[in-house]
Amino acid sequence: MKTCPTCQQTYPDNAEFCRHDGTPLVAHPREERECPYCAEMILKKARVCKHCGHDVEPLMKPEISPQIPLPAPPEMVVEAPSPQPPGSKPVAGKPPQFRTISEPPAKMKFIVMALVALILIVAGVWYFSEHGKVRVNPKDGLKYVWIPPGTFKMGCSPGDNDCDVNEKPTHQVTITKGFWLGQTPVTVGAYKHFVWATGIQMPPEPVMDN
């Protein structure tokens, strides 16, 4: 059997040319390979897959280039020590002096920066967790702020001329136990939410006199 190297159609041994494109037929043994598109077996030298019709590059045998010998390394020349003048004392050999170049420890800088950043993050988380706690009460949907225990001055501030009588004198107050304080005034919607969550009755709506 003969095969067309272009379309890979097979013909009997007495055929000389392909009846599709006129390519001379070859009778050498079939060297096949896998098509990269349809994974069917085609000839290694085929330019078109007979199964899917895609153009494929013919697989040629790599040419073996002659190996060029590498050049020989240059010979090392060792200079002989210069003769010492007569009558001079031999000088003891000194170790070679190397210049020390101090390089900045880049890895150490990154480690220190990472540790400082970690400390700042932990301190910030601790501060806001202790002094800036804000939570939403599921019973009324309002935000509450945590007031931690501590000591502060209560009363009229110095220089404030709008103080009432009950704001004087300024005195020190100590809170021994923290508590939650509403961040905003209670709204009607929040009160309705609280009534719905607790199951209590709403008070009657007030009658406004016209």
Image: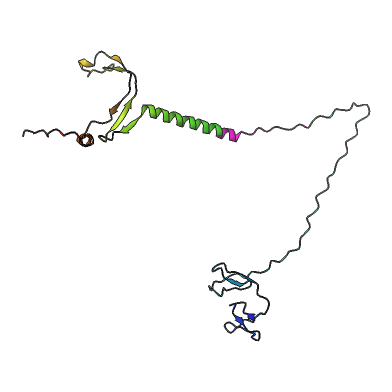
**Nearer to us in this view, 196 or 85:** 196
Q: Position of residue 165 (x, y in %)?
A: 20, 15
* Quarter-of-image position of residue 125: top left
Residue 62: image x %, image y %?
69, 66
Q: Nearer the viewer, residue 112 or 32?
A: 32
The image's colour scheme reads: rainbow
Left or right: where 27 falls relative to 170: right
Question: On screen, 167 above or below 20?
Answer: above
Q: Residue furthest right?
A: 86
Q: Residue furthest left?
A: 210
Q: Position of residue 81 (x, y in %)?
A: 88, 36
Residue 21 forms part of the magenta stretch? no
**In magenta segment, residue 99:** yes
The magenta stretch is 96-110
Depicted 150 relative to depicted 187: above or below? above
Q: Nearer the viewer, residue 85 or 4?
A: 4
What percent of the width, then of the height, locates residue 176?
A: 33, 18
